[in-house]
Image (tube, grey):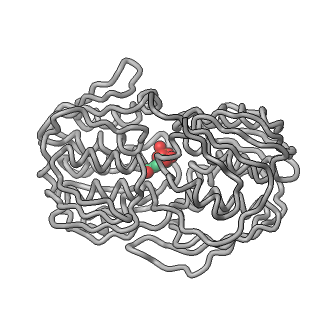
């Protein structure tokens, strides 16, 4: 039996001090993918040494790419060029990582070999039609289960993909990125138009590798006539990991936290905007651009929060931060309402249901809706909650401990290792009274 991890958080306390949270997950995945098919040797600093990004790294090793590291966040990738990947000898196992599976399905559709993509139980239940359907329009041949889920059997269509002009029905950076990567192997132009802005790390990093991508408003266009040139990549801290401390420091009276070197790409800063609308005090200091991505230090002081109607336009820009934002909402005066966030139901868990269940166990007035949640200001009690194998649910409930009036036990926290293995150490250093039990 593999080990289980339980978090136990003693109630109260505050957060104080400085921290540098680990590297951005989205950029870490993309650095391996693009570095592998670039020409020359790519050096990455700040790489996220956590299970999801390591799954991508292993997949490229399985396709013959020599990758040194990671050691202290440094990775050296000996790029094989756009057509240099080799047929894997076994299915590529991508663990819990939706980003790995969706982006790889696009990148692999036009290769000169077949491949199979598999994942854990959660990933094997997540919708893949959102990528396999537009890829099929491009001429890709991908077999999934009858439900449209993994494993994905990708049949080589080398030289047979054709560009499409795709109006994306959902705001998804993974779908956009998948199609742009497939477009690098397709005849003619491949365009994606997104219904609302989503994270644009793929477009920025392609440009950093010297690969032409045309961007006009919500439309991005690529074709096969480019080459990737090895690059130096400096991955900033992940704002999605910083978010736990942005909320924790905001809700725990007397807190004062400085989060260093955080990526503040405007397609990712919805959490700051939402918290500020709720009355949070977050200063953006020492803004700079590192490797084509904006970076800053974030200074947070505790403030009383108030409930708001979360603007729907901010939803895709804070999509991974809602579990912990729901905790902020419980601590805010009045009512907080989220709508237009149906996507939360198909993340690593159904984040609307799982958060509502856990908050209710802790005595919070949280009512799930089809596409969001209504939360009324409530005292947070102690109790036992289940993360359902979802890293961000586990960390969100740990942060709730700062305002709880009893201990919170969180079961099933192994998957914190998919995005933030250092969470318990950094959280404890800052003042969270967190104990981690391994069985
Ligand atoms: C990601 C995009 C988002 C996000 C995920 C990472 C990416 O998913 O939730 O954690 O790296 O492109 P969607 O694009 O499906 O919203």
Observer-nearest of 219 and 258: 258
**Compared with residue 4, is residue 401 higher up or lower down, i.e. above or below?**
below
Residue at left offset 78%, top offset 59%? 13
Residue at left offset 23%, top offset 41%? 108
Residue 347 coordinates in the image, percent (x, y): 53, 38
Q: Quadrant of the N terminus?
A: top left
Residue at left offset 39%, top offset 72%? 292
**Compared with residue 67, is residue 349 higher up or lower down, i.e. above or below?**
above
Can see residue 172?
Answer: no
Residue 214 coordinates in the image, percent (x, y): 32, 62
How many numbered marks appear?
A: 0
Q: Quadrant of the C terminus?
A: top right
**Compared with residue 320, is residue 127 higher up or lower down, i.e. above or below?**
above
Residue at left offset 23%, top offset 60%? 68
As drawn, is 49 to the left or to the right of 427? left
Observer-nearest of 1 and 207: 1
- Residue 271, by quadrant, is bottom right
- Residue 274, by quadrant, is bottom right
- Residue 301, by quadrant, is bottom right
Residue 27 coordinates in the image, percent (x, y): 40, 59
Residue that protrudes farthest toward the top in the picture: 146
Can see residue 89?
Answer: yes
As drawn, is 303 to the left or to the right of 218? right
Residue 40 coordinates in the image, percent (x, y): 16, 66
């Amino acid at each position: 039996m593999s080990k289980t991890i339980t978090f136990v958080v003693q109630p109260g306390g505050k957060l104080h001090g400085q921290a540098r949270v680990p590297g951005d997950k989205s950029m870490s995945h993309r650095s391996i993918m693009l570095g592998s098919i670039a020409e020359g040797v790519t050096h990455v600093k700040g790489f996220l040494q956590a299970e999801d990004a390591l799954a991508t790294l292993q997949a490229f090793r399985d396709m013959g790419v020599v990758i040194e590291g990671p050691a202290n966040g440094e990775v050296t990738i000996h790029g094989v060029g756009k057509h240099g990947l080799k047929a894997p000898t076994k299915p590529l196992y991508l663990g819990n990582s939706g980003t790995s599976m969706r982006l790889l399905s696009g990148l692999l559709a036009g290769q000169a070999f077949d491949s199979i993509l598999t994942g854990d139980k959660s990933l094997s239940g997540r919708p893949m039609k959102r990528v396999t359907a537009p890829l099929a329009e491009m001429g890709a041949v991908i077999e999934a289960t009858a439900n449209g889920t993994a494993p994905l059997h990708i049949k080589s269509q080398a030289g047979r993909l054709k560009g499409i002009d795709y109006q994306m029905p959902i705001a998804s950076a993974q779908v956009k990125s998948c199609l742009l990567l497939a477009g690098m192997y397709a005849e003619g132009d491949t365009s994606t138009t997104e219904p609302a802005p989503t994270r644009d790390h793929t477009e920025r990093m392609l440009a950093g590798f010297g690969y032409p991508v045309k961007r006009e408003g919500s439309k991005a266009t690529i074709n096969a006539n480019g080459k990737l040139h090895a690059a130096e990549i400096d991955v900033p801290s992940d704002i999605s990991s910083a978010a736990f401390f942005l909320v924790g420091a905001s809700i725990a009276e007397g807190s004062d936290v400085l989060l260093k070197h955080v990526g503040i790409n405007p397609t990712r800063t919805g959490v700051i905007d939402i918290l500020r609308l709720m009355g949070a005090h977050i200063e953006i200091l020492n803004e700079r651009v590192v490797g084509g991505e904006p970076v800053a230090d974030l200074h947070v002081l505790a403030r009383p929060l108030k409930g708001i109607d979360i603007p729907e336009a901010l939803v895709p820009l804070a999509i991974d931060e809602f579990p912990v934002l729901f905790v902020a909402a419980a601590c805010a005066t009045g009512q907080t309402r989220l709508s237009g966030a149906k996507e939360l139901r198909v993340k690593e868990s159904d984040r609307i249901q799982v958060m509502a269940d856990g908050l209710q166990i802790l005595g919070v007035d949280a009512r799930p809706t089809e596409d969001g949640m209504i939360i009324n200001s409530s005292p947070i009690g102690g109790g036992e909650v289940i993360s359902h194998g979802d890293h961000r649910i586990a960390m969100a409930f740990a942060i709730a401990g700062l305002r709880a009036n009893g201990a919170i036990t969180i079961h099933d926290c192994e998957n914190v290792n998919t995005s933030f293995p250092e969470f318990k150490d950094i959280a404890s250093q800052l003042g969270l009274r967190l104990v981690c039990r391994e069985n």
